[in-house]
Amino acid sequence: MSILRISRLSSALLLSFAFCAVAHAQYVWIDEKGNKQFSDMPPPKSVPKDKILKAPGGNKVAPAPTADDKAASASQPAPKLEKVVTTTTKNEDFNKRRAEQAEKDKKAEEEKTAAADKAKNCERARNYQQSLNSGARLSRTDKNGERSILSDAERQQEASEVKKALTDCK
């Protein structure tokens, strides 16, 4: 091979490396929606310099924020970065909603059971109050199994206790 041919080949090789370096140049900036944009072309002129995160060669283009920039950025809401939707995140969201629904169903069932118990207790209290007000003789069984008739004082005591219990009933 001749020296001329080798020099042409080496210069062509050097030029190809130079073009490859330019082809791998990357710009990174945040668009108006708050999404990161990647491109080998510079961002549009409408993108402010503080939104450009990276220019070719790994250089950060954004200058250090000043006090004025901090005040201006504090008045503007920070861009909301959206969570990437993948099958895993969809499954997590679904499982979370399913667990919340199961919790709501369990709570509703407990409330329904408590309401039914309360209604049953209120009905028993009304029936007992009716028995107390009827004037019929009522008896109770003590711990030894012996039966005793309620006196008028005991009947009044029972009536006042039933009245207190019925204040929670509708």
Image (spheres, grey):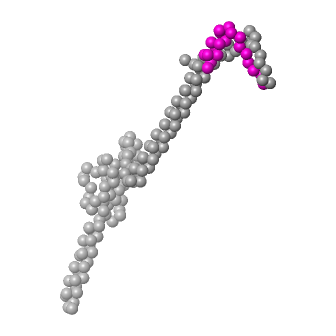
Q: Is residue 84 above or below residue 9?
A: above
Q: Is residue 151 above or below residue 18?
A: above
- Determine the image quadrant of residue 149: top right
- Residue at 60% x, 16% y is 126
Rendering coords of residue 35 (x, y %) = 33, 51
Rendering coords of residue 3 (x, y %) = 21, 90
- Residue at 52% x, 37% y is 106
Observer able to see residue 150: yes
In the image: residue 107, left or right of residue 73: right
Between 148 and 110, the one nearer to me in the picture:
148
- Residue at 45% x, 43% y is 98
Query: Which quadrant of the figure contains the C terminus?
Result: top right
In the image: residue 52, left or right of residue 143: left
Residue 141 in the magenta stretch? The answer is: yes
In the image: residue 13, left or right of residue 118: left
Rendering coords of residue 147 (x, y %) = 77, 18
Between 151 and 20, the one nearer to me in the picture:
151
Residues shaded magenta: 124-143
Observer able to see residue 168: no
Q: Is residue 102 above or below residue 131?
A: below
Residue at the extreme bottom of the image, as rendered? 1
